[in-house]
Amino acid sequence: YYDVTHSNLKYAYRDGKEWRIQIVDQFGAVGFGTSLALDSGDHPHISYRQINADNLGNLKYAHLQKGRWLLEVVQGTGDVSGRTSIALSQNNLPAIGYFRYLIAPKWQVGRAMFARYNGSAWEYAVADDMDDVGYDVSLGLDSAEQPHLSYYDATHGDLKRAFQTPLRFYRMAL
């Protein structure tokens, strides 16, 4: 969760008797739009946003490995906003649905995005970029590990769902 007092990302869990709290990331204003998934070993994986010095948002990913939090910038373009949504593959590899925005001279246009880690690198896909879409994204993976995203279409006031088999990915320069 986002600790507003300290601008940190924190993780809370119950050890059977009491609640324990850990600081996950404390570098800048971090922890906006969090999403949590537990892998097959019950280890936490978190997607979230970091607000940088220019008040722009980056997509980050954290996971607990051997008692240490490992932090990674998934997309550092500064145009990530809103919520994130994380799901794990059957091999415990992360997939993240998120919202990116493009600021044009007189308007802001959103797009629904998807990123997944293939075991060696992050892959990216635009799920929908028609009009102003992608708000409040939620991600699920089906039995074939194909992504399904639901999100809000602000242009038409609709709830939308995006899926594609197979999904076409592209590599993004960070």
Image (cartoon, helix red, strand yellow):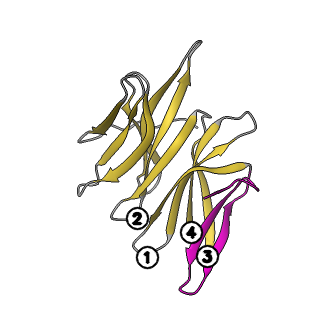
Q: Position of residue 140 (x, y in %)?
A: 33, 52
Secondary element type, mark 4: strand
In this picture, residue 173 sits left or right of residue 25:
left
Can you identify the residue that label 4 sits on? Answer: 64
Between the residue at mark 3 and the residue at mark 2, the CA separation in whole angstroms equals 17 Å
Left or right of 35 on screen, residue 131 = left
> Which residue does the numbered mark 3 point to in the structure image?
67
Answer with mark 1 or mark 2, whichever residue precedes in sequence.
1
Magenta range is: 1-27
Mark 1 touches mark 2? (CB < 8 Å): yes
Looking at the image, residue 79 lies above or below residue 149: above
Residue ID at (44%, 30%): 111
Displayed quadrant of residue 159: top left
The answer to which of marks 2 and 4 sits earlier in the sequence is 4
- Picture quarter with the N terminus: bottom right
Compared to residue 163, the image places residue 23 above or below, namely below
Residue type (three-letter) at the residue carrying disc 4: Leu
Residue 35 image offset from top left, x and y in percent: 50, 55
Q: Residue at x 40, y 56 (%)?
A: 87
Residue 170 is a magenta residue:
no
The amino acid marked with disc number 2 is Asn
